Amino acid sequence: MWYTRPVSRFAGQLRILLNNSGNTEVRFASHYKYYEDKSKPSNGETARINMYNAITEAMDYTLEKDPSAILFGEDVAFGGVFRCSVGLQKKYGPDRVFNTPLCEQGIAGFAIGAAVAGATAIAEIQFADYIFPAFDQIVNEAAKYRYRSGGQFDCGKLTIRTPCSAVGHGALYHSQSPEAYFAHTPGLKVVVPRGPVKAKGLLLSCINDKDPCIFLEPKILYRGAVEEVPVDPYEIPLGQAEVVVPGSQVTLIGWGTQVHVLCEVAEMAQEKHNISCEVIDLCTILPWDEDTVYKSANKTGHVIVAHEAPLTGGFGAEIAASIQENCFLSLEAPVRRVTGFDTPFPHIFEPFYIPDKWRCLDAVVDIVRALNH
Amino acid sequence: MFGRITTSLASAAKKSTFKICSAQQLVYFSSESPAVVSRAQQEWFYRLDLKEQESSTPIPTYRVMDEQGCVIDPSQEPKIEVDKLLKMYKSMVLLNTMDKILYESQRQGRISFYMTSFGEEATHLGSAAALNDNDLVYAQYRECGVLVWRGFGLDNLMNQCYGNKLDLGKGKQMPCHFGSKDINFITISSPLTTQLPQAVGSAYAYKRAKVDKCVICYFGDGAASEGDAHAAFNFSATLECPIIFFCRNNGYAISTPTKEQYRGDGIAGRGAAYGMKAIRVDGNDILAVYNATEAARKYCLEENKPIIIEAMTYRAGHHSTSDDSTAYRNIEEVKLWQQEDNPITRTFKYLANKQLWDASAQEDFEKEVKSQVLESFARAEKVKKPVWSEMFTDVYHDMPKHLRNQMKSLRGHLDRNPQQYPLNNFT
């Protein structure tokens, strides 16, 4: 899906035979329109780059200024299957940027140990769907290191990066958004960028943070998201949400790719239904920015949370419960969730599975009408 | 430091002469496994030298014929009837032809993904042909030839790649995630190595049921690094399960070469450590793979024990359509393997030497399978996808209420917004 290859001698025959079949559909049109990040996390020169470039820059800077920093995972040496580490082994040598054997529990455990011993460890798990063999190391070890030793030991210098979420054709095992599993684990920080600007700043914050961080990178954005990114390093504080689109009637909360879906929904709601929506990018899932969310909920009285992960036990449930506890008197309708369904992530049914703009727009219209009922 | 180690070893040795071992240990060590030596029978040594620990001779690789298709030791030539031999060869050619076409079709955006088996065809067909079709197969994802051998059929393969309504998997998985209960082939799962401990469990159940069936579990040199591989090897040895662990050692796990994947004597070298037999075989020699698998099957069913086959081969294609292997390996390396050690060419030469096949038969057959593949492909492309509500089936045996409600709400949404969804492509 990311490379082009010379066409073999079969191509012509295939075209001739099949072009008359009359059923060639346009495949894999993406389900979102990209909204560039207009925030200016730092002054100075910018360059127009995509999200994997931004991630490479953050890691490049870390490796350059921190001699203890190491970067590793499956296929990281040649640049990684999503190209995030291109050129870094050549620049920093194979003892700092390297392939590991194919073993996620090994990668996580090794990373924890390196961090415990004082190294800045940036570990890559090739797909978030494959992080589960490492679940024990992350949940029982990384998350609890400081607590169980009374603060004597910690693995705060650990950051685990992993590509997540829908990509158009990833099916069960190349599409999952596992943020809620990790959000249920005290001791971890969980972060999801929505594009290059956020990716660079949030990743640098994760790397420098004193706690272990899970950095979930929506894979569809690696190439699909391009915008002006500050050339110099900068950090974006963890635990802070961003109001991406200000509005007055409905609060739409999302993270990662879903923020872009919600930005378009806000435009559609305004144009088609004259409804003003405020879009919030949560940025950090754990610990999440309650202040920004409650402020918006108290203002609009209508809140919709949207995420690709399944409904039951998704992080939207946590947000909805907290809003009703803290903003009950301001709410004019129950908090709604628009999410993936409670099924595994399906291959050809993906257009029906994801919380696309039409399902979100339906919810916006519904939640406002509920007032009149 | 060495002094301390030596002292403690010496004192341990000294103690052991007085206190032999507990009753529990005696019972445990009375196991028949030759790899387990009881404390009482242990051989002691008294001068520590780490250099001595390093020496080990690699397990040699078994082969029946050379690159020219000539059998080296006639006693090793398997007695396979001509029809079966030709079927093995034709299945390799068909697999290779299908791979070329489906790879190209992905390039054209007709299917979303594909994985070829280029260079590894002999590992599939040599092993599949030596098994009983009732033996259970747990595959990784690059074992399409096993499906071809067992008669899965081109249409089933194409329908799965398209995820159309005839796909046995109902469009739920990515292309190449085949599976069929009818031919005893467990459905592929993308996460690596998860199939290994499961295969051991199935073998154990077969042993208890006395069904005279074994389990074969395919995996790669990369997958062997996962924790699940250790669990599977250890469980199969201790619980004495009739399973063949078939490792396709093709040199690469995506971009990672085996020298960065493991040290020591490969995957076969692990057998002894787990107390299990292992065979290393030339994976591009279909006759050697056949003999090894046949012997392994006999052994694991007669002895109720596991065995490892490590088939040494080469992944001549990219990892998948998402990969461009020129980014990490020399194209000349690939060409060399394809020219000098091509399993299909080698089998062709063997058959030609025996006057069972020739260039003109080859040309006719290639033409025939090419049109078969293209026709099957075109048929699959025309078939609609399953009805969208299939998305909600098979999550559970019976659909729970919350899922029924979610399906209902989606139905309402689709009724209100039919033009926003590709409903015309679906049934």
Image (cartoon, coloured by chain):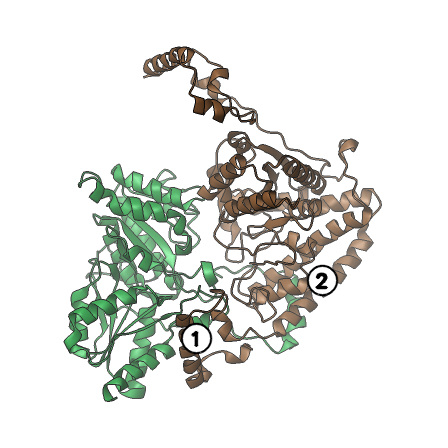
Chain colours: A green, B brown
Q: Where is residue A257 in the image (x, y as percent from the top left)?
A: 34, 67
Position of B141 with respect to A112 (left or right) is right
Q: Which numbered marker is on residue B370?
A: 2
The residue nearer to you, when weighing A15 against B101, is B101
- What's the residue type where badge 1 is placed? Met
**What x and y, as percent, mark residue A196?**
31, 62
Residue B329 visible to the viewer: no
Left/right of residue A237 with respect to residue B101 in the rendered view: left
Position in image of residue B231 (x %, y %): 47, 40
Outermost residue, front side: B23
Q: Which residue sits at x=26%, y=36%?
A: A117
Name the residue tied to disc 1. B407
- Residue B165, placed above or below residue B324: below
Give the chain of mark 2.
B
Name the residue at 25% across, 60% down: A284
Which one is in front in this view, the residue at disc 1 or the one at disc 2?
1
Disc 1: which chain?
Answer: B
Name which residue type carries label 2: Lys
Please tell me which residue is depicted at 29% across the width and 79% down the height of the picture: A266
